[in-house]
Amino acid sequence: MKKRIAVLGNGWSVEYLKVVLKGIRQAAESYGADIFFFMNYSVNDDTYEHSVGEANIFNLSECSSFDGYILLSNTFHLAEEFEFVKKKFAGADIPVISLEYKIEGIPFLGSDNYSGMRNLCDHLIEKHDVRRILFISGPVDHEENQIRKSALEDALIDKGLQLKAEDVLICNWNVAEVERLMPKWLEKQKSLPDAVVAANDMMAMGACNVLEKAGYVVPDDVIVTGFDHLSTAEAYSPSIATVDRNWENLGYRAVEYIFDKINHNTCQNENYVPTKSIPNESCGCTREEKESEKVAAERRSSYNNYLSRANIGLYVCALADTISKAVSEQQLCQVLKNAPWNATYEGKEFYICLVDNFFSSLLGGEPLREEGYSEIIDVIYGRKDGEESSRYSMECECIVPCYDTAEKDSKLYVMLPLYGDEGTYGYVVFGSEVNTMYDYSMYSWVRHMNMNLRHVRRGVVMNEMNNKLEYLSNTDALTGVYNRLGCDNIAYPFLEECHKQGRYAALMFADVNRMKNINDNFGHIQGDLALKTVAKAIMEVLQEDWIVVRYGGDEFLMVGECRDSQEVCEKQEEIAKYLKNMTEELQLPYKLRVSLGHVIVNPNERLNMSECLTRAEDAMYTMKKKLHAEE
């Protein structure tokens, strides 16, 4: 049976994801395994509700049995994410590997930060005669940053040089911090350093911007280097001298480790992939030919990403215009079918999966969960190869709708959380790797989908409230049937519609006999009971096929589709019989009877509502006289 590997990670590190997933997918294909990527867009300074909502996607990975887990731990932002993996994997028997970030009790695979950085620094000192270096540091307590700084210091010490404390700017991986602190540092210097060595490429590019604004030219006036070998840094001008972290190999070896553990092969719990220094234009070297190809690819990608970002705003607005207007469960299903889906953004296969109480939680049911997912998932919409799949329910442990265990090709599935301030909505599944994962468009897509679903929930609540208000305004409080307003809004329009469509209908009138005597002799409480008993008898006999109205104090009007006067007479007899039985059952101290009359509304005749009412009343009064004569 095909193996299933779960990957947990954050979507903000787009270039890292693109490269490491490439290695993971290549290895998965060689082993014939499927990859399930549980991805979120968590950030450190987000609200509590959003932090819980983003981190919750990791809980979905517990719903099914996987053969191994790859943790992209260096992309995690939240304490909840680290707590989840520590609780689930520390000391566990299941094959698991943490990439680039060490977590106690979990095997580790990372880049050799020291060797690549040391080679780059040796290159600066030996080939470019660098003596004084400004080091732009990441967080001081970050292990990778510490190792990169140590490699720089060792390279200097071996040449009898030193990294001075005043030549270290702590910028915490943040370009904004580089642009804030570096100009102040430059103002205090009597001379430029020979080189600026940044702990990552983003800060290196920030340093180049600062130097350019200050009137300096890189590398003529000062050399600048980075670390990570980002495509954006390669395409930058000048292209950034850096260190390639070998992320593709990292992903490939992570899958190899999982299968070594599955096959009970001996594995080290801590290992590293080699890194490579990449001299480049920012240190005064010439770009290698293969790097030129990479630049061309990055520039094409930048153009495509620009188009994608330009269009995604229009696209998500079009989706919102369609989806957010739904005010009921049925409407949401319909608008999802009519939504302007675009394979450019969703790929050829994707599914919207909601928790089973997404709708019922709005109407007094169990509230939405903050963490975890319902045992049953409502796959409210799906699309595969241009064809829509029918809505259906599945067990949560399946995770991916329509998952085919017999499919031979290795596949990648990407799961992202759907949630709101009130709890978990569900999740979305992308059945392939899509370009929107690597230009931040997917974040925009899923964020707007969350907003759309939030608007739908509010719309459902408002619609329900309006329906209740409409019901109350049209309903007689005592008997529960329609009142005179309901007669105008519902009963009469029903007759008019029947007449318009050429259908026969009946209008029936009922009056409670001796109602004044009941009130005078037995009190208004008994009078109210009499009216409620009559209304119940009428509704029980006529059921939902007829519209029942309390027309006046003790008068009721009923309309329904019917072409046979004999059929209506039978209904009248049933009402009288039912009422008699109820009178005996309730042991009422008075005889409760109703007079009934009706008229058939012929669609071939001109409809005159006043005349119909008069004829029905006349028939009712005829029956009343007869009943009074019998008493």
Image (cartoon, helix red, strand yellow):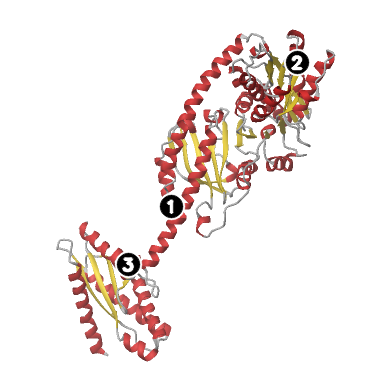
Amino acid, disc 1: Ser
Look at the numbered disc 1 and give the secondary structure of its residue: loop
- In the image, what residue occupies the spot 45% across and 30% down? 311
Q: CA distance from mark 2 to mark 3?
A: 85 Å
- In the image, what residue occupies the spot 50% across and 53% down? 359
In the image, 206 versus 429, the foreground residue is 206
Residue 476 percent coordinates (x, y): 37, 72
Amino acid, disc 3: Gly
Look at the numbered disc 2 and give the secondary structure of its residue: helix
Look at the numbered disc 3 and give the secondary structure of its residue: helix
**Which mark is nearer the camera, 2 or 1?**
2
In the image, 158 versus 521, the foreground residue is 158
Residue 586 percent coordinates (x, y): 42, 83
Residue 61: in sight, yes or no?
yes
- In the image, what residue occupies the spot 73% across and 39% down? 89
Residue 507 percent coordinates (x, y): 24, 69
Q: Which residue is mark 3?
A: 486
- Residue 203 as seen in the image, left or right of residue 104: left
Q: Which residue is mark 2?
A: 121
